[in-house]
Image (tube, rainbow, N blue to C red):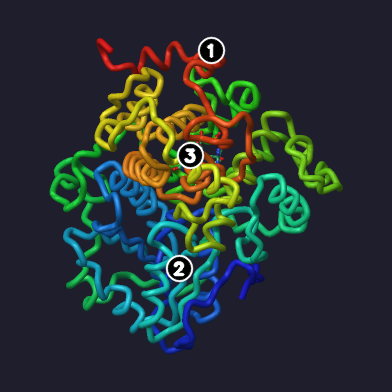
């Protein structure tokens, strides 16, 4: 088999490979793309080694938490791109979209009973680790999960990093020798294997492949599914093609000013990559590969010393350095937490000092208190907060800086920090395209002190947890246009 980084592959059961199987299955559930995908590369390697066809199953359940028209449409956009990307490839692509709850039950097991082995995606958050581990238990053949999440394989350490600084230092030590171990841009190019022309009949009869109106996410099709119809699709479209267009546009026009402009809502200077990264429509490796072209960068530009400093280590422009600090340090810090701690989404997982502050101030007087419904409908006394919430409702995202303020105010205006955490998780994961991600928990728990330090003076409700104010934010940032766009008419 092609050389493959062993630290990216995890065995999920003890069952053997069945060399007499009819094909190799790749069950795509997190890295929903054909490019820069270690899982697809691994499955293709097995197919070549065994001389068997490759079948790629991309399934979409209808009962995952917060399933809605908004999230379904984005995922289906990705399936539409995959359908055409696999069309002239040596692999057979099987998009399966559940029309009713549990329709897909038994599908993987049935495929596995005909297969040599199953390869799937290793993703550390949401329901995916539970689902893949439960599925692996009952299979008659080997099942491997492959980590194609970030530049650093999650499995190379069992340490939990508590600050971005310590994780950055670790990255700076480990990354240089891994920058030549990227997944292939197109793992199916030049692959010589027999082709499976169609699905086995036992499968297609019971589990038909998604029809064209499903992958085109037509309104009629979405409205017939048992998902949340109150959370509507947003303007931004999903899929690898939209992801790449947006990336190239950002690198071509936004990168030079990224470090200076990122905090200003009116500049809208972020890359917009987070929903595509979340659904696996693009990989951090592809983003890095395009960035290095724009920067004309090579590894000789890396600084030898791993000091943990935020700027200068990569040897890129200030925009490139700042962007990589988000894309690599902050993003992969969350993958480290979720892969190491099962309780990553629970209040008790906060650092000791933060728990002490929050619990110690639980009885403090709250000047304002709102319920989940009041927050959800953007009806607080604070126009800036309401605008951020309206952005979440209407556009499926909140500008990065305002997302911090949004979280801090929910903490301030909710009777208990546990309740504030529940509200934030509910709103973020229900409405944000990029929700339900390790980054979601990095951001939300940062509001409560994770990865942060105590800040004086003591304040009501917060204690020494970092405080943010809307008035100071209004003064500091350029957001007149943002407010015009998102303020409720007449408010
Ligand atoms: C309360 C709160 C909730 C958040 N929820 C989410 C969430 O559900 N999903 C999500 O992806 N991010 C979340 N973030 C982090 C951050 O706000 C978004 O990643 C960022 O705004 C996405 O926009 P972008 O893709 O244009 O980012 P860019 O600025 O272009 O950054 C590039 C990439 O780096 C990563 N990144 C950027 N900022 C952060 C950060 N602070 N922490 C971790 N990774 C980061 C993202 O993958 C992002 O796509 C949250 C932050 C807070 C404070």
| Sequence-earlier tag: 2 or 1 | 2
371 lies left or right of 434: left
| Sequence-earlier tag: 1 or 3 | 3
Counting other residues with Cα less than 10 Å from the Cα at mark 2, is it few (<14), some (14-19), or many (20 or more)? many
Identify the residue at horizontal 72%, vertical 50% (top origin).
166
- The mark closer to the camera, 3 or 2, is 3
Q: In the structure shown, which secondary structural element does the residue marked by tag 1 occupy?
A: helix
The mark tally for this picture is 3
Q: Residue 241 location in percent, x, y?
A: 44, 42
- The mark closer to the camera, 2 or 1, is 1
Q: In the structure shown, which secondary structural element does the residue marked by tag 3 occupy?
A: loop
Residue 475's label in the rendered image is 1
Q: Residue 15 location in percent, x, y?
A: 46, 87
Distance from the alpha carbon under mark 2 to that under mark 1: 48 Å
Residue 40, visible in the rendered structure: no
Residue 84's label in the rendered image is none
Disc 1 under 8 Å from ligand 1? The reply is no
Q: In the structure shown, which secondary structural element does the residue marked by tag 2 occupy?
A: strand
Identify the residue at horizontal 35%, vertical 23% (top origin).
386
Label 2–label 1 contact, CB within 8 A: no
Residue 396, visible in the rendered structure: yes
| Residue under pointer 3 | 361
- The mark closer to the camera, 1 or 3, is 3
Residue 120's label in the rendered image is 2
Which image quarter: residue 29? bottom left
């Amino acid at each position: 088999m092609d050389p493959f980084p062993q630290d990216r592959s995890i065995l999920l059961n003890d069952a053997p490979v069945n060399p007499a199987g009819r094909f190799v299955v790749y069950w795509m559930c997190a890295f929903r793309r054909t490019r820069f995908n270690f899982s697809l590369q691994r499955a293709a390697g097995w197919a070549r080694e065994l001389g068997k066809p490759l079948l790629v199953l991309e399934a979409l359940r209808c009962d995952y938490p917060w399933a809605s028209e908004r999230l379904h449409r984005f995922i289906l956009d990705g399936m539409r791109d995959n359908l055409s990307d696999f069309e002239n490839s040596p692999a057979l692509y099987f998009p399966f979209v559940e029309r009713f709850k549990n329709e897909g039950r038994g599908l993987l097991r049935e495929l596995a009973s005909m297969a040599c082995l199953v390869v799937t995606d290793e993703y550390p958050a949401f329901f995916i680790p539970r689902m893949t581990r439960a599925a692996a238990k009952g299979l008659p053949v080997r099942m491997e999960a492959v980590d194609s999440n970030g530049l650093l394989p999650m499995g190379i350490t069992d340490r939990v990093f508590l600050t971005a600084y310590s994780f950055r230092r670790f990255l700076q030590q480990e990354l240089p020798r891994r920058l030549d171990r990227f997944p292939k841009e197109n793992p199916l190019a030049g692959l010589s294997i027999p082709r499976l022309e169609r699905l086995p009949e036992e499968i297609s009869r019971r589990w038909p492949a998604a029809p064209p109106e499903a992958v085109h996410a037509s309104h009629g099709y979405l409205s017939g599914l048992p998902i949340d119809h109150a959370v509507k699709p947003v303007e931004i479209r999903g899929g690898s093609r939209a992801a790449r267009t947006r990336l190239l546009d950002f690198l071509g026009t936004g990168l030079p000013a990224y470090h200076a402009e990122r905090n200003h809502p009116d500049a809208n200077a972020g890359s917009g990559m987070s929903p595509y990264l979340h659904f696996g429509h693009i990989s951090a490796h592809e983003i890095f590969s395009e960035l290095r072209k724009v920067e004309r960068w090579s590894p000789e530009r890396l600084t030898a010393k791993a000091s943990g400093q935020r700027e200068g280590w990569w040897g890129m422009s200030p925009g490139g350095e700042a962007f990589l600090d988000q894309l690599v340090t902050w993003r992969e810090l969350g993958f480290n937490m979720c892969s190491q701690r099962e309780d990553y989404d629970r209040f008790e997982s906060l650092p000791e000092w933060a728990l002490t502050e929050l619990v110690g101030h639980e009885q403090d007087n709250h000047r304002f208190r709102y319920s989940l419904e009041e927050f959800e409908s953007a009806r607080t006394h604070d126009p800036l907060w309401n605008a951020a919430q309206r952005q979440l409702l209407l556009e499926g995202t909140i500008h990065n800086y305002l997302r911090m303020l949004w979280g801090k105010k929910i903490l301030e205006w909710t009777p208990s920090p546990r309740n504030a955490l529940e509200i934030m998780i509910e709103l973020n994961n229900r409405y944000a395209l990029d929700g339900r991600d390790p980054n979601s928990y990095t951001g939300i728990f940062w509001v409560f002190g994770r990865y942060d330090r105590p800040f004086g003076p003591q304040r009501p409700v917060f204690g020494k947890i970092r405080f943010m104010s809307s008035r100071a934010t209004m003064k500091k940032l350029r957001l007149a246009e943002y407010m015009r766009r998102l303020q409720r008419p007449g408010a």
